[in-house]
Amino acid sequence: MSNTNQNNFMLQLPRNIFSGFVVSLVALPLGLGLALASNAPPISGIIAAIVGGIVCAIFGGSQLTITGPGNGLVVVVLSSIAILGGDDLYAGYLYTLAAIIFSGAFLIFFGLFRLGAIGEFFPSSALQGMLAAIGLGILAKQFHVMLGFTDSKGSTVELLLTIPNSFIRIFQNPSKEILLAAFIGLFSLFILFFYSRIRNKFLSLIPAPMWVVLLAIGLNYYYDIIINSEYPIDKSLLISFPSDVLNSFPFPNFDKIFQMEFWSVVLSLTLIATIESLLSIKAVDKLDPQKRRSNINRDLLTLGGATVISGFIGGLNVVTVIARSSVNVNNGGSNRSSNFFHAIFLLLFIFLFKDQIQRIALPALAAILVYTGYMLSSPQNFIRILKIGKEQLLIFLITLVTSIISGIIFGILIGIISTFIIHVFINNSFFLFSRNILKPNILMYKENETGNYYVSVKNFCSFLNFYKLKNKIDQIPENEHAIIDFSLCEFVDHTVMEGINDYRRVFKRKGGVFEIIGLDVHLTDTQHPFAIRKSLPIKDFFSINKNLTKRQLSLEKLSKVLGLTYDSDRSSEFRSLDKFIYFKTKVIDYQNNQLSSEKNNFSFFDLSYSEGAFIARQELKASFLLINLKHNIPSFILDKESFLYSINERFGYNDIDFKKHPVFSNKFFLSGANESAIRNLFDSSLILFFEKNQSYYIESRNSQLLIKGRDRFMSIEEIKNLLTFATELVSILKNFKNE
């Protein structure tokens, strides 16, 4: 490690320790809950998190990912224990540990032979259907446990249909034990669903799952100390650890390695672990403020090694997890050390607070898993996929239903086949694919005149051959100018549209240009930027009509009154928003409802974007105003003063105060790299202007100003007020002279 890198590492260490601690607060309840949902001992989930955190932090190829037990493997491990062990769950667990070790060996093989590209052969909507099936499986089993009943058995469909029976059982025998268990579970679920609506930044420092755990432990102590009576929860509904954790590691049982059912389990574990890890790695790379890209094959190699170690000492598979990784990014994690510290904190929790952890009631952990399952299979996911295209919803539903009925492996296989059949139906041609699937269809060269990289795509581009296009694009430096031409391509599917949009984001964040041309000769039946494109009309079955909402009609009317240009269409062109710090850890989906003025050089628009993913994912919608000034001003951030900013001050975000203007200093957080230039900009007239007007989030970057209001779309009156505010602000800034 060079001196510069070593200095940067030491400077970032406090922030990564803090982030690792916050992540551990999420990882503790999830590790316990995922293990219990898999019918494995609770400690097995924590073992996977500790081993994964230490091994992957030292040898991994990703900077921001957190590793541990994954949501996707719950259903597979659960069925594995049942298949391999029958009625003897502990024996099934020991056989499953052997299967976990072999699945880790396969991951090592994938990494060594650079097979990380295997994740590109899965259609996006089919993957979403598989994840939704996993979510429903988790929800179906854990909903009964959340109400205090651990004896419910059956398939996912049977468990979902018998949820009303569990509610009936509560009132058929309303004992204190049953009522308290149900209360703990339902109240915990209430906290998880409504936690994101709390705007108190002090409370939000502790993740929702940890609040659930703390309240569950607190209730146990309430009966023990305050009421001085026995906790009215059956021992079977409490966490149980071995008395001596270090000397209680189980040894895997390899007796079934010559049976087909064993290798079926190994295949399932390997496939789901690979898919979940690859999806997570790609998702976290989008959130990286430093615009780094992970070494996927190195990650698979490291995850495989960690899984082998974890299996030998009684732990579950180690995978890359989106939710905990998102928490890491959102709390300032900047390198792999945050993964290491999250593991160390978990180790400390087990040895220092083992007795307290064993006071947690299972309904509280089940509520966390019910919420996780709901997030994976939320009705919003159905609506989001429908907006992309009806054919995508059909693929999603086919994969979902098949996965629930026949298992995850068969489900994703049918999802792939159904995607291909639907593509044939849409194009009314089987030969488009059969004739061209093996032909080279990508041409790339560097233009001598401009130095641009030109990539031409011919015939078709879908999940079947997207890897060919990716291989070419990956050869282009991300700070260069790339032009992707689809004019010779008859069909482009949703998976490809989503994938090339990811490339556009990466190039833009690295200072490059990623242009997509040739799609103007294609047709699409929805306004979504990721919808399929084809050169012939698409059948009416897949058409969606577009109508303006009442707000959009009001915006259209406002544009005419003010002499502005209005565009209601969704667009994935984000006007260089990635340069602003606000968007460094956020993923932008699309913008629409744009009001613009060439004369005044500004653009107002609604933006849909997200922060984090899965259980940590927050869907955000807000209105923004982007102003292009005629001269440069110092870069700064101005926002309402809050407790969170006082914490950030300790990590390098200094609040610039003005002794002569205490009202302004108490009201606003002002920060920027060049403090003297900012003080020069913020003279008395500008400070007085901000004091007397409504507060907005304002960020400047050279000659551009970004203004944001609340975390929602603005009303028509609020838009008018914002435009008036911006006009006065620009007028004041005209007088600034950059010295």
Image (tube, helix red, strand yellow):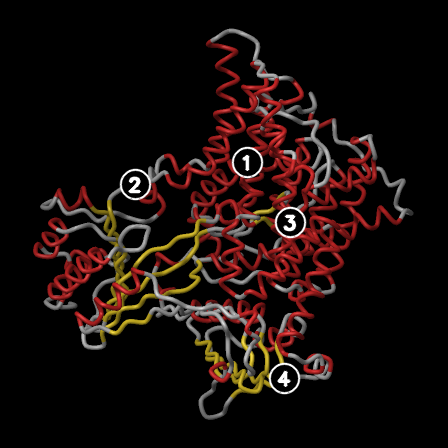
Q: Looking at the picture, which amino acid does disc 4 mark?
A: Asn
Q: CA distance from mark 1 to mark 4?
A: 47 Å
For marks 3 and 2, give the one nearer the viewer. 3
| Residue wearing tag 3 | 133
Q: Residue at x 52, y 25 (%)?
A: 184
Nearer the observer, 668 or 609:
609
Mark number, residue 459: 4
The circle drawn on residue 646 is 2
The image quadrant that residue 253 belongs to is: top right
Query: Could you tell which of marks 1 and 4 lies nearer the N-terminus?
Result: 1
Cα–Cα span, label 3 and label 1: 17 Å
Q: Secondary structure at mark 1?
A: helix
Q: Which is in the foreground here, disc 3 or disc 4? A: 3
Measured from the top left, where is residue 1 in percent x and y? 54, 56
Up-down relation of residue 598 to residue 718 (above or below)? below
User: Could you tell me residue 347's position as x and y percent?
Assistant: 59, 33
Depth check: give the residue in front, 255 or 354: 255
Quickly name the residue at label 1. 368
Closer to the camera: disc 2 or disc 1?
1
**Distance in Å between CA atoms under marks 4 and 2:** 57 Å
Disc 2 packing (10 Å; few <14; some 14–19; many ≥20): some
Q: Position of residue 306 (x, y in %)?
A: 69, 47
Cα–Cα span, label 3 and label 2: 43 Å
The residue lying at 62 percent from left, 51 percent from top is 131
Q: Earlier in the sequence, mark 4 or mark 2?
A: 4
Secondary element under disc 3, as helix, strand or loop, is helix
